[in-house]
Image: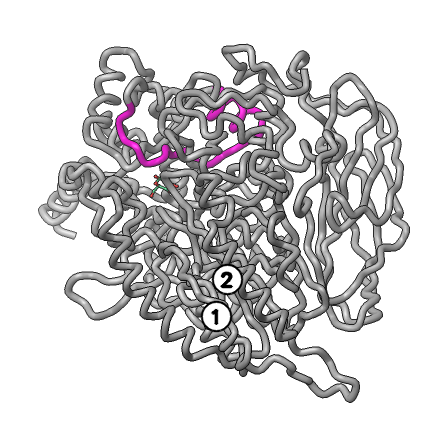
């Protein structure tokens, strides 16, 4: 090689080396961090702009990557750091269904809502739903789905209960972990939300949830703890509210001491969508362990820079969060440049929606009229019901999901007319005509009368519920002559930004009560059955009317295939196996937390650990339908359990036999009554559950359930530890908390586990049980 050529090459080499910017890879995070300026680090910790505050052009401008997605993390192209896209959830991918400049549509599958998924008690099935949601997230070019919703159903009036799973932390944790494992198996992340104690929508951005350390640890945090330990979510979303005086978003006790030190969490924490908070500095959020400020405002970037420059915020804190962000980013499809198709497999996802909804639907009452297709003597199907009169506006405007950020733009919703038709059952043409016309009128009227401030009542935030229309007994009589049965659908809509009232949302309205009574009276006079379908995301009052219809089905908001799932249950194609994951009280005020719910400025948790069945069972109160309840078209028998105590867990082996005439699945629930010890305990608590496969008549399955000993422990505030007393624990194995089929006793040795002594209430709480 000539001397001059060599010199030129050396010069070029030196220049490229001097100017070389490391490009982010999974193995050079240290190097990239060294190359980052303070400005770039600060930028990475602040959401990459969207249209929330109208300043998207200033930070990154990534808002248009996926129109309608909730937010992004910002790109730093110099260092090969791409933007990542965060989309709502949890019941499917919430993005805009249409985009400018293209005829292509971007509808997403509407999967069953949280309460419906949890009511399956089937973690394998929920994992499959998670896989489908994860796949859709990825194919729509998103990196994280903002779900699952893992707050507890502290009170039935919370507007967002539909997104959450249960009043019980074990169900919440196990179902949440299954969903997360499913989503994350697809190479995208979740954001388990809203961490924590976000049990009301009213004043959610300011309310102070005053809660004892014990109730926080045992109930409100436990679901998240289980999910962290069993599924390591990529991200967790801190909630808007305060806990014992401190905003969750800037709460180091919560985001670091508990989440990372006690539980071993390794992912990132992002804020809920509020930007700059009054009374909470961004620097404090960074310090507390909040890694990503969403949706992000440029002023927050500046706050971080100023904080470091003035010495208020340490560079170590910034670096720690930046590192976690980079560790998150290298896992994402955006980083891996996954070629999203924008064409998920809708058919496969509709099938999983229909199937999972069927398993989550709960049969509350059946005097023998269901299923409609009973096996006849000659084994031929004998369909007695050929024509049905469908009452209730939600038979036609079937609610697939709730409102707010949790609403998905679904390609379609199968209503009851279509669902029954697909099952070979016709419905009244007159009623269809009336209700469809009414729907058009009610829709327009609703939007006209809607208060402008109620922005979640706009149609892009979900289907709305309209008032019922009245039918005279003469009109119902005409229907009764033509139809073989009637259905009355009672719908309820609720969602983000507001809680439900008792008079018109928990209770039935007078119009609804009259409709049920009149239809029951006229159809029963004609000796024809009436089924009530509850199309609601959460609990309603049933005690005052449940004696009237022949059967009651709680369909929840089961996703886009709703009508088909219901037809499967009504005809008996699928045997119901859903069980309630929350108590249905006689009246809303039976829950101790209803008094003063929702709190305006503070919400003191006087009921403490006595939430849901923990209260109703301990204080021996009657309920309409107990926690864990759900009927089947067949019957099951449980064998005597075999119980073993190991060093880490108690195992319970039980054989379930289908003793009826049709195939079905059953849920085995193990409640534990603890010995009298140093800490007061609820009468019983759910400690394990499992679901059988579909068992044919006469078939059995042996299930093995494990209860980790640490799960038997209660939270001892004095010692800041988990503590299980030495003594005899009674395992109560049943199909609801009030239908126990077998019991067994085990001796367990004292167990303790120290944790950080944090999250203390600042005020005396006047607890119900003190
Ligand atoms: C909700 C979150 C949601 C976020 C982004 C917030 O108002 O509380 O659940 O993920 O908005 O849309």
In magenta stretch: residue 265 = yes
Within-10-Å neighbours for mark 2: few <14, some 14–19, many 20+: many
> Which image quarter is the C terminus in?
top right
Residue at the outermost front position:
474
The one nearer the camera, 552 or 628, is 552
Calculate the distance from the C-alpha at mark 1 to the C-alpha at mark 2: 9 Å
Residue at the disc numbered 2: 489
The magenta region covers: 253-277
**Percent from the top left, x then y, of residue 215?**
60, 25
Name the mark on residue 416: 1
Give the image's coloring scheme.
Answer: one colour
In magenta stretch: residue 140 = no
**Percent from the top left, x then y, of residue 563?**
49, 69
Residue at the image position 77 percent from the left and 35 percent from the top: 648
**Percent from the top left, x then y, of residue 338?**
35, 58
Label 1 beta carbon within 8 A of ligand 1? no
Name the mark on residue 432: none
Q: Give the quarter the ligand 1 occupies.
A: top left
Q: Are marks 1 and 2 in contact (CB under 8 Å)?
A: yes
Whichever of callouts 1 and 2 sits on the residue coming sooner in the sequence is: 1
**Element type where label 1 sits in the image:** helix
Q: Nearer the viewer, mark 1 or mark 2?
A: 2
């Amino acid at each position: 090689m000539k001397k001059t050529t060599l010199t030129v090459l050396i010069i070029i080499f030196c220049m490229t080396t001097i100017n070389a910017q490391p490009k982010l890879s999974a193995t050079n995070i240290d190097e990239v961090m060294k190359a980052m300026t303070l400005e770039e680090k600060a930028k990475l910790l602040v959401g990459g702009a969207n249209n929330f505050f109208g300043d998207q052009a200033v930070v990154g401008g990534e808002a248009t990557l996926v129109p309608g997605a909730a937010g992004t993390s910002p790109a730093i192209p110099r260092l090969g750091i791409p933007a990542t896209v965060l989309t709502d959830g949890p019941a499917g991918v919430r993005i805009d269904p249409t985009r400018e400049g293209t005829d292509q549509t971007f509808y997403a599958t509407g999967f069953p809502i949280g309460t419906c998924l949890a009511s399956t008690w089937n973690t394998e099935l929920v994992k499959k739903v998670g896989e489908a949601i994860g796949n859709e997230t990825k194919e729509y070019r998103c990196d994280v789905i903002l779900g699952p919703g893992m707050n507890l159903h502290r009170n039935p009036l919370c507007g967002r209960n539909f997104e959450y799973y249960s009043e019980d932390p074990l169900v919440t944790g196990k179902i949440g972990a299954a969903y997360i494992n499913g989503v994350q198996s697809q190479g995208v992340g979740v954001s388990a939300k809203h961490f924590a104690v976000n049990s009301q929508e009213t004043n959610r951005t300011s309310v102070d949830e005053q809660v004892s350390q014990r109730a926080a640890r045992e109930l409100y945090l436990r679901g998240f703890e289980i999910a962290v330990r069993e599924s390591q979510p990529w991200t967790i979303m801190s909630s808007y509210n305060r806990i014992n005086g401190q905003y969750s978003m800037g709460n180091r006790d919560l985001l670091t001491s508990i989440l990372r030190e006690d539980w071993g969490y390794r992912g990132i924490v992002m804020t809920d969508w509020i930007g700059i908070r009054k009374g909470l500095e961004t620097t404090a959020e960074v310090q507390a362990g909040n890694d990503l400020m969403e949706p992000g405002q440029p002023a927050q970037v500046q706050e971080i820079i100023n904080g470091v420059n003035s010495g208020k915020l340490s560079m170590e804190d910034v670096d720690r969060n930046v590192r976690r962000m980079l560790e998150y980013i290298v896992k994402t499809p955006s980083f891996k440049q996954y070629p999203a198709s924008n064409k998920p497999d809708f058919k496969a996802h509709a099938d999983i929606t229909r199937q999972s909804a069927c398993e989550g639907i709960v049969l509350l009452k059946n005097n023998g009229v269901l299923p409609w297709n009973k096996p006849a003597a000659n084994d031929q199907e004998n369909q007695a019901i050929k024509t049905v009169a469908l009452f209730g506006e939600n038979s036609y405007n079937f609610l697939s999901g709730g409102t707010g950020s949790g609403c998905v733009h679904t390609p379609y919703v199968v209503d009851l007319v279509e669902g029954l038709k697909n099952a070979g059952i016709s419905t009244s043409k007159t009623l269809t005509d009336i209700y469809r016309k009414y729907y058009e009128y009610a829709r327009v009227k609703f939007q006209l009368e809607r208060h402008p401030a109620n922005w979640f009542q706009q149609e892009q935030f979900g289907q709305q519920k309209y008032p019922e229309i009245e039918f005279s007994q003469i009109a119902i009589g005409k229907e009764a002559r033509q139809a073989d049965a009637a259905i009355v659908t009672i719908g309820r809509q609720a969602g983000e930004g507001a809680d439900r009232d008792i008079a018109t949302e928990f209770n039935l309205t007078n119009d609804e009560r009259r409709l049920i009574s009149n239809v029951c009276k006229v159809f029963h006079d004609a000796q024809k059955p009436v089924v009530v379908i509850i199309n609601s995301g959460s609990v309603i009052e049933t005690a005052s009317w449940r004696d009237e219809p022949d059967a009651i089905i709680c369909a929840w908001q089961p996703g886009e295939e709703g009508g088909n799932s219901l037809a499967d249950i009504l005809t008996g194609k699928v045997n119901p196996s859903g069980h309630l994951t929350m108590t249905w009280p006689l009246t809303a005020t039976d829950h101790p937390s209803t008094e003063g719910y929702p709190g305006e400025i503070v919400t003191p948790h006087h009921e403490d650990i006595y939430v849901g069945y923990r209260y109703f069972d301990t204080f021996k109160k009657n309920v309409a339908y107990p926690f864990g309840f759900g009927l089947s078209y067949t019957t099951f028998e449980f064998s005597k359990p075999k119980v073993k105590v190991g060093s880490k867990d108690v195992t319970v082996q039980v054989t379930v036999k289908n003793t009826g005439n049709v195939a079905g699945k059953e849920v085995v629930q193990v409640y534990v009554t603890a010995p009298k010890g140093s800490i007061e305990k609820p009468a019983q608590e759910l400690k394990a559950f499992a679901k059988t496969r579909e068992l044919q008549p006469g078939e059995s399955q042996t299930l093995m359930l494990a209860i980790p000993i640490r799960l038997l422990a209660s939270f001892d505030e004095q010692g800041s530890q988990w503590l299980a007393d030495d003594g005899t624990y009674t395992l109560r194995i049943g199909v609801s908390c009030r239908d126990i089929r077998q019991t067994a006793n085990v001796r367990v040795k004292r167990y303790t586990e120290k944790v950080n002594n944090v999250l203390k209430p600042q005020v005396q709480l006047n607890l119900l049980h003190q």
